[in-house]
Image (cartoon, helix red, strand yellow):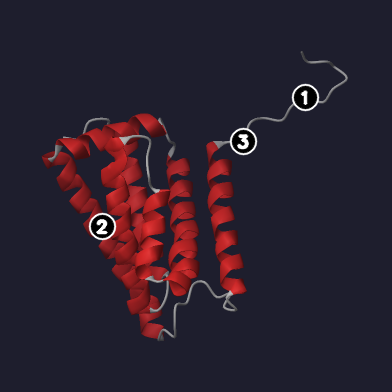
Amino acid sequence: MYSPDEPSPGPPLSRASLVIGLYGAMALVALLISSGRGDPNLFVVGTPGATLLIASPLAGFLLGLAVVALTRMATRRFAWARDLHASFHDLLGPLSGQEIVILAVASSIGEELLFRGALMPWLGVWPQALIFALLHVGPGKRFLPWTASAFILGLVFGVLAEETQNLGGPIAAHFAINYVNLRYIVRDRAPG
């Protein structure tokens, strides 16, 4: 029971605060791992030229849009993709436009710093992709396609980071995929 002499409990943390905390913690772990290796610059993977620093985010964004197009095609053609879409719709519940932006920005930066920025130079492309996929294991067998796609995208993002020597492309691709797909998932329960 509440007593007037006790301070009232603060409001519960918002979803946005939890998301920023989670992905901020990922970025901090990435910085600690990278610093422990003696290379705290997480964004640069090698020695990129100025052209790559500009072209990398554009290439990543276009890659992200291509993945979104494949996602739409899968939801129209395959029952497993429609079931996965509906499961995410139910799991996420309503999200505001601001929450979608925060989730897309925080997840793309936090995960890319950790997996491609910190773990990939240490462990390699394949192991970081496997760990990335394991982070994307959902509650039930119906989420296995999401886990498999996370593994494939972990490999693709890793190769993109290696080829462009920076994380601009993977961050842009990750953001595009999450932002566009989250808007689609929360808007429509059953894709058509």
What residue sits right under mark 2 in the picture? 65
Among numbered discs 1 and 3, the one appearing first in the sequence: 1
Among numbered discs 3 and 2, the one appearing first in the sequence: 3
Residue 8's tag is 1
Q: State the separation of the CA atoms marked 2 and 1.
A: 47 Å
Q: Are marks 2 and 1 in contact (CB under 8 Å)?
A: no
Whole-percent x, y for residue 30 in the image: 55, 64
Residue 13's tag is 3
Quarter that holds the C terminus: top left
* Three-letter amino acid code of the residue under disc 3: Leu
Q: Are marks 3 and 2 in contact (CB under 8 Å)?
A: no
Name the residue located 61 percent from the left edge and 66 percent from the top edge: 32
Q: Is residue 41 above or below residue 114?
A: below
Between 168 and 25, the one lying in front of the other is: 25
Q: State the separation of the CA atoms marked 3 and 2.
A: 32 Å
| Residue lying furthest top | 1
Among numbered discs 2 and 1, the one appearing first in the sequence: 1
Whole-percent x, y for residue 130 in the image: 37, 58
